[in-house]
Image (spheres, grey):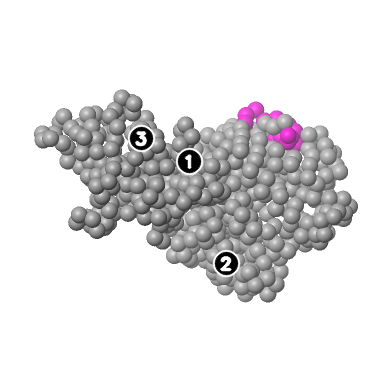
Amino acid sequence: MSYNKFSSAKSVMQKLAVLPLLAALAVGTAAVPGDAKAASAISIYLDGQQLSADAPPYIMPKVNVTMVPLRIVSEGLGATVSWSAKQRRADIEMSGSSISLIAGQSYATVNGKRINLDASIEVKGGRTMVPLRFVGEQLGLNVKWDGKLRTVRLTSPGENGANPGTGTETPPNPGNGPETGNPGPGTTPGPSPSPQPPEQPAEDPAELRGAWVSTVYNLDWPTAASAKANDSAKQKQEFTALLDELQKMGMNAVFVQVRPAGDALYPSLLSPWSSYLTGKQGVKPNYDPLGFMIEETHKRGMEFHAWFNPFRASTTTDSSQLDPLSLVRQKPEWIVNAGGKPYINPGIPAARQAVIDIITEVAARYDVDGIHLDDYFYPSGTEFNDEATYKLYSAGSGLSKADWRRSNINKFVQELDRSVHAAKSDVEFGISPFGVWRNKSVDPTGSDTKAGVTAYDNMYADVRLWVQQGWLDYVAPQIYWSFAHPTAAYDKVADWWMTTVKGSGVDLYIGHSPYKLGTPETGWQSSSEIIKQLDYNEQSGSVSGELFFSAKDLRRNTLGVADALSSYYADVQ
């Protein structure tokens, strides 16, 4: 069982014809062993016309997948291909179909559905090389492989009796059958081997199904008892048990809070050790918790996303409880106390950069699958005294304080996107904002809701802009309301987000709230509310995954939610 990484299309567009690429992709079903340089060249013909390439195809070792340069796509059906050097992503658009491939990613996205790949695209010698298995299967090209001549002949639909939807025929492994289980040409009488049936593509590959794991206040992990005792063995046992339980429910990813209160669950020169590991900030545990968690998560075929609260400086204003490495003590001029808690002031450019450096450190040093932020930008519902900062840094801009604050967060998100991907190009960067961007009554582009708080107006988070600009690989709004909610019904909020991400290349995950089950709030008296929301997501065809807040609420199995999820996801286990 393989799980997915998610990314977004960005930057420079090149208009290229796609059919030769698709033709070439069909060749990728060939499992050709050995050194690609030693083998004779593979010739590719489309409807009788030979296709040329600016770099020779080659065979990826171990997986035996044929790779072909993207620039083989030249003239044909007039489709467009966008290539993002930054994201290392190719997006193909043709006749209402959309195909996306990302370097280092184990799946391709075809019309919103994920199909597993044996190999990802990669850049070699300045050429973007494409794995060639799945696209031909999507187009119904008729493919004939001549193993003796090492020639692939493709016939497009309607040419020479080809039937649409027949898929590709996989050329057999020439001369080394035992390695792949296919007979080589020497084992079969006749001038050339018969084409073998194609391997079946993955059926409905699993979309992301994640749980947030809160470490602040020891909510989900580790327990307060194991932290107080600084018991690393107990903490390890607790985390592996958590993973096993979540995986049994159908989860394939965890989003772990690695910097819960301006402190770290990993060794760092930029942040002190977290008090939630040892009972006292700055005290070193006798293991690397982040390294351990990543290893155990990957052992189970699950993804690990590092979750940050970007501008939370601490959970206490008592600096005597904080380590000297804490930013509260290092840079008190950066700190604003609001609502009884210290925040890093996003209006100070150096403070924003410090947060970016802290987050990028993890992307650069650890094998994380994603970098994840929640909605800790400007706090809502409380006064945030940044008047002096506003006057200093907005001088001459003409911006209102609200627009200036949004500009600060926009700059932060844009630069963090750049920094994280510069450190690790294939890591996924996403944000989980408050569920309502703006109300339609205030902004005609907003949702049909009457929320008392919105991301744009109260947290100064213009998430819609981030999606439009492609500064995120995914967005995961916290839609923590039921279908029956009177002012922010689930379907109305979800529909707005589906419309917002459409055509952007940004994936949509939806944050769900099992923590509300069994509460008096309308709609949360049965776990069927969660299942109805998942059904709604699935039927829309626009949602790429879901997250649940939080792990403890799933593990408690309130109103049977864990059992319901296990049953719901059983068919994709």
CA–CA distance in space, label 2 to label 3: 44 Å
CA–CA distance in space, label 2 to label 1: 30 Å
Q: Label 2: how many residues lie within 10 Å, few (<14), some (14-19) or many (20+)? A: some
- Contact, mark 2 vs mark 3 (Cβ under 8 Å): no
Give the residue type at disc 3.
Pro
Question: In percent of the image, x 71 and y 65: which residue is there?
Answer: 453
Q: Label 3: how many residues lie within 10 Å, few (<14), some (14-19) or many (20+)? A: many
Q: Can residue 79 be seen in the rendering of this structure?
A: yes
Whether 469 is among the magenta residues is no
Give the residue type at disc 2.
Trp
Of the residues under marks 2 and 1, which one precedes in the sequence?
Answer: 1
Residue 57 circle label: 3
Residue wearing tag 2: 496
28 or 282, nearer to the observer: 28
Q: Quadrant of residue 260?
A: top right
Question: In percent of the image, x 57 and y 70: which residue is there?
Answer: 492
266 or 238, nearer to the observer: 266
Region rendered in magenta: 270-288
Residue wearing tag 1: 103
Judged left or right of residue 404, residue 387 is right
Residue 249 image position (x, y, % from top left)? 47, 51
Tell which tag, 2 or 3, sits nearer the viewer.
Answer: 3
Give the residue type at disc 1.
Ala
481 or 541, nearer to the observer: 541
Of the residues under marks 3 and 1, which one precedes in the sequence?
Answer: 3
Q: Which residue is at the far left?
A: 189
Residue 144 image position (x, y, % from top left)? 22, 44
Whether 272 is among the magenta residues is yes
